[in-house]
Image (cartoon, grey):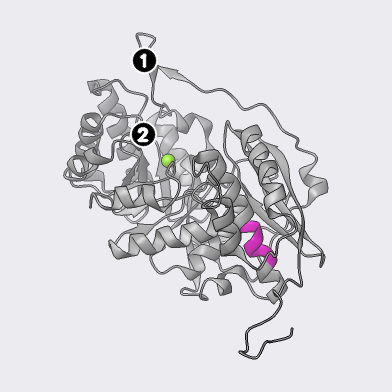
Amino acid sequence: MVNDEWGFPREQRGAMKITNLTSVVVGAGMRNWVFVKITTDEGIVGWGEATTEWRTHSVVGALEDFGPIVVGQDPFRIEHLWQTMHRGQFWKGGLVTMSAISGIDQALHDVKAQALGVPIYDLLGGRVRDEIRMYDHLGGGAPEMVYGNLPAERAAEVAVQSVEAGFDAVKILPVPVVGALPTGADLRHAHDTMAAVRAAVGPDVDIMVDLHGRCTPAGAAEFARRLRDHRPWFIEEPCPPELVDELPSIAACGVPLALGERLVGRSEFLGVLKTGAVAVIQPDVCHCGGISELRRIAALAETFGVSVAPHNPLGPIATAHNLHFAAATPNFLIQEQMRNAVPWYDDVVDGALVVRNGKTAIPDGPGLGLAVVESEAAKHPFVADEQIMSTHADGSVADW
Ligand SMILES: [Mg+2]
């Protein structure tokens, strides 16, 4: 590189160029994983994930729209490309666009870290911890758990299976789809499930309770008061995420609150943080704006004394990116993983995650330290998403 008389470079660094941006869709049971592949003229391939349930074609289309913007650019300029894909566009934000940006941003981090011969977490300031605490998504992915209808004894069994698989924190969904106010039967089911799980796993396993945004604020408060004595570690998405102003009244019931899996971009998180009602935020690296925006959201949360527990029922590439974030982020709390999504979870990548005593090791890299095995991925093509809709007893549409 030639410098001018002031010492500034005359030419952009530009040794490497992005040559292609493509997606690989993998039908993985409950959802399609959308892996994002960036190739470069130096042969380095970076991987990200933009999985967005029920919006697979939309996200793949958004990735195609970003192709002409990204191809030909320098993959080292991650922030510049992020700004180009967000600020530089007339239509900004939204779930689909931000999910596409998220996958691209992750893949750029993988490319750059590989090129520098370091793990991604070293691009983020380096390790701040030696191991990463993990928890198992809703019964390890038991589909019945998602609907909140799992009998109490069965919920206890799947929680014990998670503990036996090495976890010391589990998340359950004991609250069924309810009307504006829960019935006595709804409250009993939630209480009995929580009590059975607490009795089965003992006092020292942390139990997170996901209300899935399916309650009104008044209903969520009823459940919070009913479950409080069994020490839920936190209650997640107590009401639909747009009801930000109602969060303090639910928090006043005496349980820590968590939410954020359906929020994208730092501004949406700022609105929640300013309520002072949440203990934990749960951004998803596949939706919130990638590693770059996840780090900014975490820094914002840190200024409010709030922890970060990234949402992640998605594929192995998203899990790996989350681990790099966790390694380098001081106010990280715990990482979700959907261990039993499909029996071949680890087969589509060239590595496997091992959880022992509730913890996993920091990935080594270089880069992400994990790549998609495309020949294995091709064995599981796109499958139409299962359409899920819940109704109340009178046939009206319910939040689920
Ligand atoms: Mg949730």
Q: Quadrant of the C terminus?
A: top left
Please name the residue shown 26% across and 48% down the image. Answer: 231
In terms of depth relative to the viewer, which is nearer, 310 or 73? 73
Q: Quick check: can you spot residue 160?
A: yes
As for residue 108 lying within the magenta part, the answer is yes
**CB at disc 2 and ligand 1 closer than 8 Å:** yes
Sequence-wise, the earlier of marks 1 and 2 is 2
Amino acid type shown at disc 1: His
Whether residue 46 sits left or right of residue 106 in the image: it is: right
Rendered view: 377 above or below 118: above
Q: Secondary structure at mark 1?
A: loop
Image position, residue 287 (x, y; %): 52, 46
Real-space Cα separation, disc 1 to disc 2, in angstroms: 15 Å
Whether residue 107 sits left or right of residue 222 in the image: it is: right
Please name the residue shown 23% across and 23% down the image. Answer: 181
Q: Which residue is mark 2?
A: 213
Q: Secondary structure at mark 2?
A: loop
For this orientation, the residue located farthest to the top is 394
In terms of depth relative to the viewer, which is nearer, 139 or 322? 322
Please name the residue shown 62% across and 66% down the image. Answer: 77
Q: Which residue is mark 1?
A: 392
* Mark 1 residue crowding within 10 angstroms, few (<14) / some (14–19) / many (20+): few
Amino acid type shown at disc 2: Gly
Image-quadrant location for residue 71: bottom right
Image position, residue 334 (x, y; %): 43, 58
- The dot on residue 127 is none
Rendered view: 265 above or below 244: below
Q: Which residues are magenta?
A: 106-111
Image position, residue 378 (x, y; %): 80, 41
